[in-house]
Image (cartoon, rainbow, N blue to C red):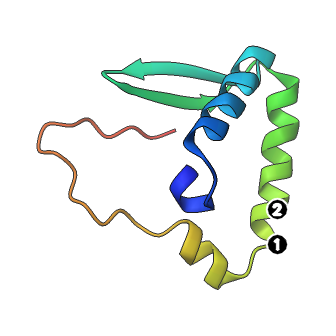
Amino acid sequence: MSRDFGVSLDGVQRQLDRFERSGALVCQRQGRTLIYSWNPKSRLAARLRDLVGVVYGGLDPEVKEQLFAERRQPRAKDKPVIRG
């Protein structure tokens, strides 16, 4: 995310930690990777998800493509696919 949005990694990690402490996100560790997802029990998460949807819906298709381009590196052979 930090690379995609041009912000510091530390800033992204701190913000994700704040969202987790507020209960909006839940985090699972897979090896060295932290996987964040919306907390289905949180009313704040539901509202934030709606807000993200409004912002995403308002982006131009070119901006969406630039920010959310498909993976360029192949997935490791035995790495599990995580869908959220």
- Name the kind of residue labelled 2 in the image: Val
Q: Secondary structure at mark 1?
A: loop
Q: Which of 48/11 is in front? A: 11
Is residue 1 visible to us here?
no
Which residue sits at x=69%, y=20%? 20
Q: Position of residue 47 (x, y in %)?
A: 88, 38
In-image side of 76 versus 39 (left or right): left
- Mark 1 and mark 2 in contact? Answer it, CB < 8 Å: yes
At 61% from the left and 60% from the top, the residue drawn is: 6
Q: Is residue 27 left or right of residue 14?
A: left
41 vs 43, left or right, is left
Q: Pinpoint residue 76: horizontal percent, then vertical percent.
A: 16, 45
Residue for point 22% across, 51% down: 75
Which quadrant of the structure image shows residue 40? top right
**Which numbered circle lies on residue 72?**
none
Closer to us: 45 or 73:
73
Identify the amino acid type marked 1.
Gly
- Residue tagged by mark 2? 55
The local secondary structure at tag 2 comes to helix
**Residue 72 in picture, x, y percent from top left:** 30, 66
Q: Quadrant of residue 63?
A: bottom right
- Mark 1 lies on residue: 58
- Up the image or down, 38 lies above or below 27; here it is below
Crowding at label 2, few (<14), some or many (≥20) Cα neighbours within 10 Å? few
Q: Using the numbered discs, state the Cα–Cα distance from disc 1 to disc 2 in whole angstroms.
A: 5 Å
Is 75 placed above or below 57 here? above
Residue 36: x and y in percent read: 56, 30
22 or 52: nearer the viewer: 22
